[in-house]
Image (tube, helix red, strand yellow):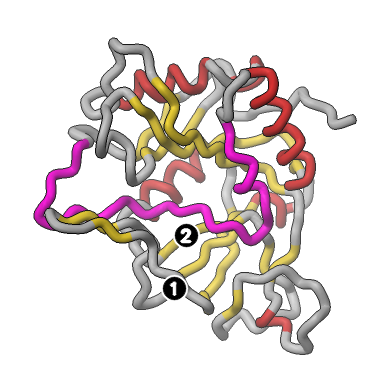
Amino acid sequence: TTFMNKTVTVLTAPGKRLCKYFSSATSESWQSAKYFTASEISLSGIEGFYSLISESADLRDRCIIRGRLRADADHSKPVRRQLNRQRSADPNEEAFEDVPREWIMIDIDKLALPSQLKTSTDPTASVNYAISLLPEEFQNKTCVWQLSASCCLVNDSIFSAHLFFWLSEPVANEHLRLWAKNVNAQAGIKLIDPALFNAVQIHYTANPIFDGREDPIKADRVGIIRGASGEVSLIFKPP
């Protein structure tokens, strides 16, 4: 495994709000940004990811992506969130490469929970239920979780969250898209959103802002469930 696979690309868009905003009168989505400052953060494993997500939750102008910053980009200047397709002479305009990564973020969106689970007061139980629906290799593995902005806004029994796992080896986005479709087919529901497995797809990591409106979550929005192992070995082999 090369060292560069053990990194996460962190993007910052100064002056932009990369999280949802809820007030008593309105709700607003993320603000879009054309240019970002980018850095590669080296991580030692899932515990490092927990530190990164915990820190990023309160940084409203920060997000992460799976792509790797090009070596020939000027890292001191802003970059565009585009893949290197050799269309531009300026590497900062197509600043990222599609590379296999040793981490995965699984986006669970609008999962119906058993009636006894209440995410607003006990998110860990809801996370454990979601993990129980994932393939066998994810069971009893350490998971970093973050509740989605919309979680529990309307209904406490509908669960949305991001689940982060560390993989035993780097896995390509193309492989992960096939894997996600296979998992969904076996589960009979859209359990995992394959759209995240794209080098420049934003993974939002900032908690939402509640302004004059109560946050329905009465517990931490970020946490970690420590399993018997900190690594997941994907079993799925694409055709």
Task: Give the vertical position of 122 relative to 161 (above or below).
Answer: above
Residue 85: image x %, image y %? 80, 73
User: Visible in this render: residue 106?
Assistant: yes
Q: Which numbered disc covers residue 63?
A: 2
Quarter of the picture containing the C terminus is top right
What type is the residue that disc 1 sits on? Ala
What type is the residue that disc 2 sits on? Cys
Task: Give the vertical position of 31 relative to 236 (above or below).
Answer: below
Q: Which numbered disc covers residue 138?
A: none
Residue 181: image x %, image y %? 70, 32
The quarter holding residue 135 reads: top right
Mark 1 or mark 2: name the one nearer the start of the chain: 1
Describe residue 151's horizontal placement relative to residue 99 as left or right: left
Describe residue 226's horizontal placement relative to residue 230 as left or right: left
Residue at the image position 52 percent from the left and 39 percent from the top:
107
Quarter of the picture containing the N terminus is top right
The quarter holding residue 94 reads: bottom right
Residue 185: image x %, image y %? 69, 23
The segment highlighted magenta reads 192-216
Describe residue 154's horizontal placement relative to residue 98 as left or right: left
Number of on-image labels: 2
Q: Judge by depth and name the residue closer to the eye, 71 or 113.
A: 113
The quarter holding residue 124 reads: top left
Residue at the image position 12 percent from the left and 54 percent from the top:
24
Residue 108: image x %, image y %? 49, 34
Residue at the image position 72 percent from the left and 39 percent from the top:
176
- Mark 1 = which residue? 13
